[in-house]
Image (cartoon, rainbow, N blue to C red):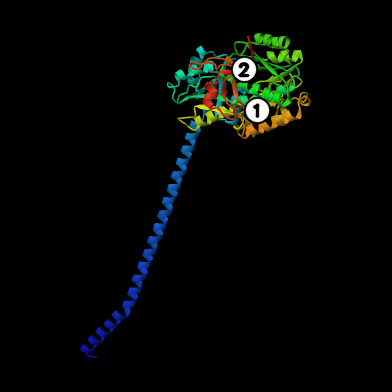
């Protein structure tokens, strides 16, 4: 082979080799490109997974921190200043029971108290309770609860509360409260009016005031409704003691009503057990106040106590406590709750603000088994009907009946007692809450107010 031919052959083989290898080179490059892209996609997926895990971890930590803060904040101390002793009283006893029921339902609420607190002690005791951690400070009577308003601005994070007698003073964190006890007292009046045989019913009362007047009026309207239905003449006698808790004086007045005025059904607007003792000794019917005195205190028996009305202050206190726990800066400042308002206790029992009750029974069953046969069926049916209507918010004795002044009562600033015979409110018209709480300053026509 010549040298020239050999060089030509080598050049041709080199060309064929280059042409034959070009597809393989392209395939390798494509494969490499795909592999790199896949690897990048895998890396992106991994990165996203890691980021999600980190975000979830951060959220869980934050949630735990918030819950812990809420638990720390959601603790309250309910402090009640009782104007009287608790043991052996119906008024302070009912407030004490209410606070215990609140503490039982809400483990993060503690109940503390002071007894026999007068107006001069309300503020210093209040500040002492606040220093010890009180979140809510209550004066359980108006005359010693009103001074708490003086320190309301000083302690903006504390709620203060006072019972309403006739004054309606409030401020942002100074709350006023009262139950519509007159509704249950109306039912008691129906029963008392049916039970009396002499036609004389007596009330051992504290002193003329708005809260006393509202309650006595509710009772009196019930008595007169029963008397009209049964075509009876019934007189209600009221004699004032001069204060809420004077056992000896209450006893004397109860005896006077029975011996001098031939009373055979007795009730009270005072706080000791003395009137009940006299009723039991004299063998007449007694109508209880503020609490189920037979079922809760074991006082006397249903042979003497025909029925009681029971006040569940806890329904009102729960509203206040829940607002405080929620951090409400502007709570409702006037609470006037009735039979159509209720709460559920720790044991699951639902209770209205007020109700008739006796020996741990409510409604018609609360009427003494010994008294029940003495009460005509039409009265029993009416008690049942009116109770149900009031619990549904469909009827109210203060709307149904007219208000005619007796010419007696107590004067308020700028509001004299209406003259006897004045129709202050016609039947079928519901007075405003403000009027009932702050302007109802007269006795109803026909009530006998004794000196």
Q: Secondary structure at mark 1?
A: strand
* Left or right of residue 283, residue 77 in this image: left
- Cα gap from disc 2 to disc 1, whole angstroms: 21 Å
Q: Is residue 64 above or below residue 104?
A: below
- Rendered location of residue 94, percent (x, y): 62, 22
Q: Secondary structure at mark 2?
A: loop
126 to the left or right of 302: left
Choose the circle earlier in sequence order: 2 or 1: 2
Q: Quadrant of the C terminus?
A: top right
Which of discs 2 and 1 lies nearer the camera? The answer is 1
Q: In the rendered view of the protein, which quadrant contains the N terminus?
A: bottom left
> Please, is residue 232 above or below residue 42 in the view?
above
Q: Residue at x 51, y 13 (%)?
A: 119
- Residue 86 shows which numbered tag? 2
| Residue located at (47% from left, 43% from top) | 60
Q: Residue furthest left?
A: 4
Q: Name which quarter of the figure residue 293 lies in.
A: top right
Q: Position of residue 377 (x, y in %)?
A: 76, 30
Tell me if mark 1 has few (under 14), some (14-19) or many (20+) residues whose alpha carbon lies within 10 angstroms of its own.
many
Residue for badge 1: 355
Q: Residue furthest bottom?
A: 1
Picture layout, residue 411 above or below residue 433? above
- Residue 407 is left or right of residue 295, and the answer is left
The spot of residue 133 in percent (x, y) is 50, 23
Q: Quadrant of residue 140?
A: top right
Give the tally of numbered discs: 2
Residue 19 in view: yes
Q: Residues within 10 Å of mark 2 (few under 14, many from 20)?
A: some
């Amino acid at each position: 082979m010549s040298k020239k031919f050999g060089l030509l052959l080598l050049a041709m083989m080199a060309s064929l080799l280059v042409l034959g290898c070009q597809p393989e080179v392209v395939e390798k490059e494509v494969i490499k490109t795909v592999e790199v892209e896949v690897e990048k996609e895998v890396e992106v997926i991994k990165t996203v997974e890691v980021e999600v895990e980190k975000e979830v971890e951060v959220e869980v930590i934050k949630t735990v921190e918030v819950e812990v803060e809420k638990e720390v904040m959601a603790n309250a101390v309910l402090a009640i200043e009782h104007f009287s002793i608790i043991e052996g009283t119906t008024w302070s006893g009912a407030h004490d029971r209410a606070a215990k029921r609140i503490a039982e339902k809400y483990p993060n609420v503690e109940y503390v108290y002071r007894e026999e607190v007068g107006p001069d002690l309300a503020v210093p005791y209040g500040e002492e309770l606040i220093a010890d951690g009180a979140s809510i400070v209550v004066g359980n009577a108006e005359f010693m609860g009103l001074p708490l308003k003086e320190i309301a601005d000083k302690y903006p994070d504390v709620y203060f509360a006072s019972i309403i007698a006739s004054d309606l003073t409030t401020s942002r964190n100074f709350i006023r409260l009262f139950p519509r006890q007159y509704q249950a007292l109306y039912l008691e009046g129906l029963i008392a009016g049916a039970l009396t045989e002499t036609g004389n019913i007596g009330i051992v009362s504290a002193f003329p005031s708005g809260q006393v007047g509202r309650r006595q009026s509710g009772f009196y309207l019930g008595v007169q409704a029963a008397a009209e239905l049964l075509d009876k003449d019934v007189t209600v006698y009221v004699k004032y003691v001069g204060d809420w808790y004077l056992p000896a004086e209450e006893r004397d007045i109860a005896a006077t009503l029975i011996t001098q005025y031939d009373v055979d059904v007795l009730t009270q607007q005072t706080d000791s057990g003395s009137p009940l003792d006299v009723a039991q000794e004299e063998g007449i019917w007694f109508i209880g106040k503020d609490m189920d005195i037979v079922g809760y205190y074991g006082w006397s028996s249903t042979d003497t106590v025909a029925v009681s009305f029971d006040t569940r202050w806890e329904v009102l206190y729960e509203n206040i406590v829940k607002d405080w726990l929620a951090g409400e800066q502007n709570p409702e400042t006037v609470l006037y709750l009735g039979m159509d308002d209720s709460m559920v206790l720790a044991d699951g029992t639902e209770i209205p603000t007020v109700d008739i009750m006796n020996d741990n029974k409510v409604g018609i069953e609360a009427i003494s088994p010994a008294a029940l046969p003495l009460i005509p069926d039409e009265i029993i049916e009416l008690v049942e009907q009116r109770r149900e209507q009031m619990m549904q918010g469909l009827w109210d004795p203060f709307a149904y009946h007219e208000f005619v002044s007796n010419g007696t009562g107590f004067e308020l600033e700028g509001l004299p007692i209406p003259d006897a015979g004045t129709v202050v409110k016609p039947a079928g018209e519901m007075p405003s809450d403000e009027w009932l709480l702050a302007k109802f300053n007269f006795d109803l026509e026909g009530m006998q107010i004794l000196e």
